[in-house]
Image: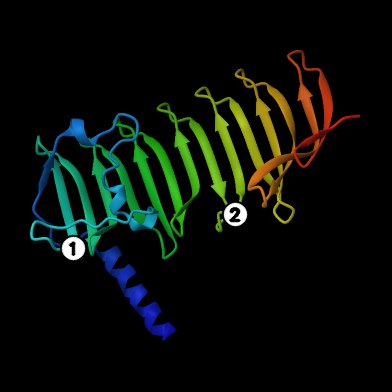
């Protein structure tokens, strides 16, 4: 029975990979760019049709049937807005486009567990890249328009806790660096910076599963504007006074 289930899943995945270059297309639907392109979040109207990232809606064709194979939508200007491959009304592979022709986002499956989403600025520069594992965003990277990394986050595959979280200013200077030191003890190192990129505090933290929170735990070093340091001792999120 397990072999049969695996064979069905494997055939479906091969069909999906083959579909990237072939297949029939449904009649076109036209949209106004002003209504479908959000200036901050981009083109999000199709995300509800993507079950791999939590979408639970189904798209139907003009006859009321769930869309199958390739579907393409266009702007009122005739430019391509969306081209996606559907199975039973839900998206499997797709690209959205700005009206100027550049890709707004691209989604594809990497294997049975992982899929990848890339989002772009109107000039074609990468805006965000997300790798999903079993439907949850495991690795997420945001970029400034100049190409500098703005934010990076990586989680364990079971999404129990973080592996790393980093944020940067547009000039590349760090704002926060949070990294896993000991996976078994869920122990982390954290560095906090001021707006000029100067280190202002660093120390260890631990993940508290019962509170679903990260708490200061251990010795912390605090830096003032002149570079002088003071030490603090923390236990389970509470500072221990000497």
Is residue 110 rendered to the left or right of residue 165? left
Q: Between residue 48 and residue 179, name the one nearer to us.
A: 48
Viewer-side label of 2, 1? 2
Measuring from the top left, give residue 134's x and y in whole percent.
46, 60
Residue 23 appears in the picture as rendered: yes
Instruction: Name the residue at 67% across, 21% down.
Output: 198
Instruction: Name the residue at 34% across, 57% down.
Output: 51
For label 1, the residue is: 68
Q: How far apart are marks 2 and 1 (CA)?
A: 36 Å
Is residue 112 rendered to the left or right of residue 163? left
Q: Residue 129 carries which label?
A: none
Measuring from the top left, give residue 89's x and y in whole percent.
22, 60
Measuring from the top left, give residue 108's x and y in whole percent.
34, 55
Q: Dot 2, how many residues are within 10 Å of its Cα: few (below 14), some (14-19), or many (20+)?
A: few
* Mark earlier in primary sequence (2, 1): 1
Q: What element carries label 1?
A: loop
Q: Toward which corner of the image does residue 16 lie, by quadrant? A: bottom left
Is residue 91 rendered to the left or right of residue 99? right
Q: Which residue lies furthest to the top in this view?
A: 226
Q: What element carries label 2?
A: loop
For label 2, the residue is: 160
Figure check: 83 above or below 15: above
Instruction: Name the residue at 10% across, 36% down.
Output: 76
Measuring from the top left, give residue 21's x and y in whole percent.
22, 59
Q: Dot 1, how many residues are within 10 Å of its Cα: few (below 14), some (14-19), or many (20+)?
A: many
Figure check: 30 above or below 114: above
Rendered-image quadrant of the N terminus: bottom left
Mark 1 and mark 2 in contact (Cβ < 8 Å)? Answer: no
Figure check: 184 above or below 188: below
Rendered-image quadrant of the C terminus: top right
Q: Which residue lies furthest to the right in this view?
A: 242
């Amino acid at each position: 029975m397990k072999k049969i289930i695996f064979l069905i899943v494997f055939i479906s995945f091969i069909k999906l990979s083959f579909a990237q270059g072939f297949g029939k297309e449904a009649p076109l639907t036209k949209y106004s760019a002003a209504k479908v392109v959000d200036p901050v979040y981009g083109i999000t109207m199709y995300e509800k049709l993507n079950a791999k990232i939590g979408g639970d809606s189904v798209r139907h064709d003009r006859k009321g049937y769930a869309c199958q194979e390739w579907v393409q939508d266009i702007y009122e200007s005739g430019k391509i807005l969306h081209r996606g491959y559907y199975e039973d009304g839900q998206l499997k592979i797709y690209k959205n486009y700005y009206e100027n022709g550049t890709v707004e986002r691209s989604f594809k499956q990497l294997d049975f567990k992982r899929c990848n989403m890339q989002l772009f600025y109107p000039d074609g520069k990468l805006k965000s890249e997300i790798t999903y594992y079993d439907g949850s965003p495991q690795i997420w990277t945001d970029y400034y328009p100049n190409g500098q990394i703005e934010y990076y986050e990586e989680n364990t595959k079971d999404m129990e806790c973080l592996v790393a979280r980093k944020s940067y200013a547009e000039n590349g200077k760090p704002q926060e660096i949070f990294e896993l030191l000991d996976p078994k003890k869920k122990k982390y190192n954290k560095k906090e910076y001021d707006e000029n990129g100067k280190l202002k505090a660093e120390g260890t933290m631990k993940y508290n599963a019962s509170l679903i929170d990260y708490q200061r735990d251990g010795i912390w070093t605090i830096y003032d504007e002149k570079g002088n340091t003071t030490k603090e001792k923390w236990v389970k999120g509470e500072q221990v006074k000497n």
